[in-house]
Amino acid sequence: MPGPGAYWYGKEEMEAAMEVMNGGYLFRYGSETDPKFLKKVFTLEKELAQYESAKYALATSSGTSALLASAFALGLKPGDEIIVPAYTFVASYSSMIFLGLVPVLAEIDESLSLDPDDIEKRFTSRTKAIMPVHMLGNPCNMDKIMAVAKKHNLLVLEDCCQAAGASYKGRKIGTIGDIGAFSLNFFKTINTGDGGFVITNDKSLYEKAFGMHDQGHTPNRTGVEVGNRSLLGLNFRLNELTAAVAIAQLKKLDRIVSVLREKRAMFKSLITEAKGFRFRTLNDPEGDCGTLCTVIFETAEKAAKVSAALGSKTVDKSGWHVYANMEHVLAHLKSIGQPHTKGAYPKTDDILSRSMNISIGVVDGGLGAGWGININSSEEEIKKAAEQFVKVCE
Ligand SMILES: *Cc1c(COP(=O)(O)O)cnc(C)c1O
């Protein structure tokens, strides 16, 4: 039950992977003079930078490693605090925790992403950065978030893992803040099984992220002399096979997003007659990925009833995206004296208990989106799903 890119795996991905196998170079580095070395990672990075209108793109092994490399590049140090929404995937927290940072949770609003009005309430003298997470394909309110960041001189790391293809007021997400991290795992807009990337317009951030992801090397290992390295890194490199598949998926991204927006518009228009709910706020309806349709009911009882009747769940009961469902994160927060119990973020708890995620392109029970349509659903199927929804709402 994956993201839309997986529904559209085809001969493009298969041929690209075979081409790499035939060439015999699977590592991101190879002989510059051998035509069999196809430079897929290098090409992917060029195409990603172009697609995202970013100066630099760095391919990584996952979205989690993209987040780690990004936070490291920003120069965040152990003990520094970063404001993160209380509704996100566990990796937004765990990647920061592994760098010794303190994730400070903040409320979400009815866009199901970071509530800009709650950010300043979370400030301490150690606050250094904000992590807007573009949840469920929906860009955050970046105007307000950037205004807060600017006012207080804070760094902004955009977690774009669920929103490849999204834009905010005409700008692709990921470079509105200082740096952006994306995922290419199975559940995202486009995917390669696993994988990720970082984008930024800042050369020094790119160089640091590159070094972090490749044992401290300078970009593409050019100009490194032993005795001259200042960075310690790890290995979060992407390989040629995965990059070949990513290039094929990236070519499908715009089409995926436009088909999903169309199908969602149709589904939404067919359920507006039902009563007792409203649609989640879209901070930029033109820029949203269309991967999900989130409905927010007037009461938690109604949300529970409707979602159960459809064989689904309310968002608060879904998997690992709700702070209150992350016992391992809560245990860590407790150990460092941060709020760590269900109820610590009442606005988030309330919204999530009244919300249901309906799949349009991301069919993922772990997101509470096990019910809905998918990117290949026919008009008939969309009508049928909408009728069913309207019926159980009554
Ligand atoms: C998927 C996801 C990640 C992590 O991506 P991986 O590629 O699985 O490591 C991080 N943040 C959010 C919001 C995600 O949805």
Image (cartoon, rainbow, N blue to C red):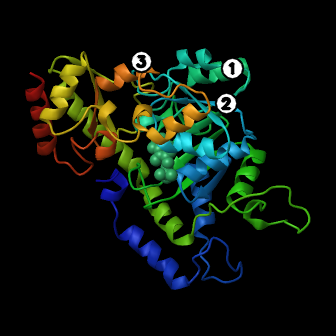
User: Which kind of residue does numbered mark 1 sit on?
Assistant: Thr
Residue picked out by circle 1? 124
Cβ atoms at labels 2 and 1 below 8 Å apart: yes
Q: Is residue 276 above or below residue 7?
A: above
The yes-or-no answer for disc 1 within 8 Å of ligand 1 is no
How far is mark 2 from mark 1, CA to CA? 8 Å
Tell which of 157 and 324 is nearer to you: 324
How many discs mark residues in the rendered view?
3
Residue picked out by circle 3? 346
Mark 2 Cα within 10 Å, few/some/many (few <14, many 20+)? many
Estimate the x, y position of residue 358 in percent, counting from the top left.
Answer: 26, 36
Residue closest to the far front: 335
Cβ atoms at labels 3 and 1 below 8 Å apart: no
Q: Is residue 278 above or below residue 45?
A: above
Mark 3 Cα within 10 Å, few/some/many (few <14, many 20+)? few
Q: Is residue 251 above or below residue 130?
A: below
Name the element at disc 1: loop
Question: Going 58% across and 64% down the picture, which residue do you hit?
Answer: 238
Estimate the x, y position of residue 184 in percent, counting from the top left.
Answer: 47, 54
Residue picked out by circle 2? 81
